Image: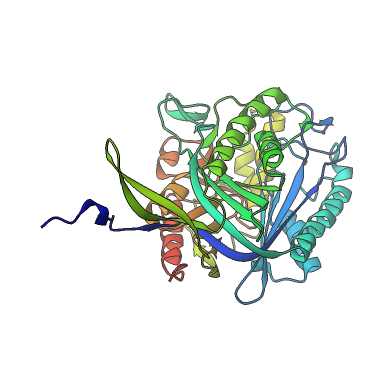
Amino acid sequence: MASPKSDLRPDKTIWAPQSARLTAGVAQRVIDPPIGIRSASWGAAKLHVVTGIHNHITTTAMVVRGEDGLDNYLVTVDWGWWQGKSDDLAVRGEIIRLLGIEENQLLLHLTHTHAGPTTASDAAHLDGGDLVAGYHATAIEKIVEACREATSTATVVDITWSYGKCDLAVNRDLPCGVEDVLAYNPDVIADDTLTVGRICDSNGKIIGTVVNYACHPTTLAWLNSKASPDFVGEARVMVEAKTGAPMLFLQGASGDLAPRDGFSGDTKVADKNGRILGFATLAVLENMLPPATRIRFTNTVESGALLGEWTQEAFIAAGKTDRVRLDIGVPLQVLPSIDELKERWKDIDAGARDTRINRAMKLRAGYVIDGAATHPVWIWMWGDAVIVAQPGEAYSQFQTELRHLHPERVIFVLNCTNGPGYMYIPTPESYERLRYQAWQTLLAPGALAKIIAETSAAISKLPNPSP
């Protein structure tokens, strides 16, 4: 005999958003650079110093207290990328020292704007370079201030994690004859995944948001001389105006992704791109359940159709945390000498040539040791979320594969974090197509696959967040 309709129930009667109950805090500081400081992010640029501020350069710090009682810091800075190991450690090493923590307690993430001040620590002899050391010292002070405020205000929070979509990014590997150039490729669909975390205190007040999206901040290019977070700035203004709380932006695996409308000198284009990301982020936040809330199937109702009711109820998410560091042995290309590179590029624009040569020298220092290299990857688990961070510019396959392999978790994937290893991690096809990303990197084909495999294996060994 069939069950009465009033007894009909789905197999799964409870649905809870992926979430975490943790002890955490968030704080933010403005770290605008002085006018006249060196920028020089583009080889094609003719003006190499900052002439104004388009949107605030900021640092945002989030601290999460682990089950071992240690504070772990996720810190974002609106800078571009580390030139080399000495530049990274001149800032990151000093922050670690001042906070009195171990290296693996800090993820220092650069949002990868190409319109920010230089990160080079050896630029004093260059135009605008005399301002760099003083600016970096001030920035370090503000970063540490934000970290300490986040720690002092840390409280029990409920973090809700969710995926959304944003179509700002496009593929930027455009076939032109036998090789590819960096330009919009309309024939390849880009990864549009947007990952968002909403942090709420015990009263349900939002105290911070975390936004992870993969798209090169290259709206503002060689015709721009204003310091800017690029599209990140306007997106942050929108989200913070709505939530009343700081937003941490985390640059995803964007080695092959950029805005369709880019390489511009017009800040209005950057703001337009930022609104695309900002509206997409607000849509994800709007669609979330209230904090510490899940839904339960409770009843069926006869109407024109048989309807099922879901009712909200309170619940406490798991607060499991973990932290792992990997040092992955990676294959290297046969590297030309610096003299060979100078000969190879002798006929190109002098500014572009000097940029390439300087970067090639710095990439090798501290990364290639006795002809071998290891690539660092940090994996942090916060409840149902996993943060995967590394210093390179990985192709989007890095994040799409990890999310495909681990659908039970919300995965944040970060480029441009800590170091060393500040280079592209491209797909095998990139080497065949003679892409910039393939001849810029020290890594050989197969490096991306190896990093994905070992990172995925480490995620599989993480504890169950919701036993």
Side of 134 relative to 108 (left or right): right
Q: Dividing the picture into quarters, in which one does residue 373 lie?
A: bottom right
The answer, for residue 370, to whether it is visible in the render is: no
x, y percentage for residue 394?
Answer: 52, 47
Q: Quadrant of residue 146?
A: bottom right
Most foreground residue, 220 or 342: 220
The C terminus sits in image quarter: bottom left
**Residue at 77% from the left image edge and 71% from the top image edge:** 100
**Which of the 4 image quarters holds residue 203?**
bottom right
In the displayed structure, would residue 45 be above or below residue 314? above
Taking the image as shown, residue 321 lies to the left or right of residue 2, namely right
- Which residue is the extreme one toward the left? 1
Relative placement, left or right, of 412 versus 145 is left
Residue 390 in the image: x percent, y percent? 57, 56
In screen coordinates, is 364 left or right of 224? Answer: left
Percent of width and height locating residue 356: 65, 39
